[in-house]
Image: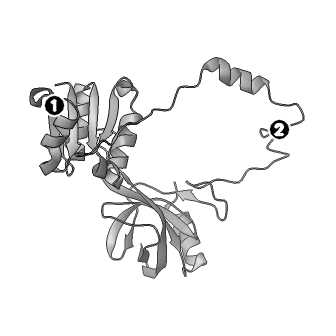
Amino acid sequence: MSAVVIGASDLLSALVSRAGLDEEEALTFSDVEPLQALQAVTERQPRVVVLERLFAATSRGAALINRLKSDPALSEMEIRVLSHSGDYSRVIARPAPIPVSAIAGSAAAVSPAAPDITDTQAQPQQPLDWHGTRRSPRYRVRPGIELQLDGNPVSLVDVSIIGAQVLSPGMVRPDQRVRVTVTRDDGAVRFRGTIAWARFELPRRAGDAGPHYRAGVEFLDADPDVLETFCQENKT
């Protein structure tokens, strides 16, 4: 087996032919089997992975491509996107490694007059949240802490009085309005929120959580005092 081909089940034969492969040398997976495809690629390390163009444009396809690109063990493998008909064909480029000499040269070329960003007394640094905003301190929380979005439980990664980062097994979309429920010992607190950003992720290692959406939730009308207490109670 020298290739893995992924696409809609009714397009797989056409994709194998368009890629110039023989049926015997291609292992095929439908576009609803990204985890199985990822496992096969990781274990067998084929010379090429072919993704159907429409699947590659989905959040699942993009997550799979990013996962394959980030694996050093697959650095010699070609990732190709094809249409099942027509002439569209594209090889996914990988970021070129930066030579150590170039990094050293860049460091040596810093002007003496440039601000010293390591001088924390001159430039006090505030803690950054997952996306770098500094509107409010963001706290990592203990494992197992959950919120509810529209009644569905999601795992809490970090939280502040104005927002949170969560892992959701169900799909969430940017700009989606949600009802947020925070459960405390003295009862549940409910308020409105909106999904600020979201991306689909596949597990990186065996034992990781299954496919999920990582998302940022912006709180719209939450009580800041209640949330500050929640942050202090659950931060690591």
In the figure, residue 188 lies in which quadrant?
bottom left
Give the residue drawn at x 13%, y 28%. Answer: 22
Give the residue drawn at x 26%, y 26%. Answer: 45
Q: Residue 116 — which label?
A: 2
Q: Which x, y percent locates residue 91?
A: 38, 34
For the residue pair 171 and 150, the one nearer the viewer reads as 171
User: Seen in the image, is 232 located left or right of residue 149?
Assistant: right
Q: CA distance from mark 1 to mark 2?
A: 55 Å
Residue 169 against residue 89 in the figure, above or below: below
User: Seen in the image, is 60 located left or right of residue 85?
Assistant: right
Q: Which x, y percent locates residue 108?
A: 78, 23
User: Seen in the image, is 234 located left or right of residue 205?
Assistant: right
Residue situated furthest left in the rendering: 24
Give the residue drawn at x 52%, y 28%. Answer: 96
Q: Which x, y percent locates residue 216?
A: 49, 63
Q: Which residue is mark 1?
A: 26
- Element class at badge 1: strand
Q: Give, as a three-letter code, the residue at label 2.
A: Asp
Residue situated furthest top in the rendering: 101
Residue situated furthest front in the rendering: 86
Q: What is the number of callouts on the image? A: 2
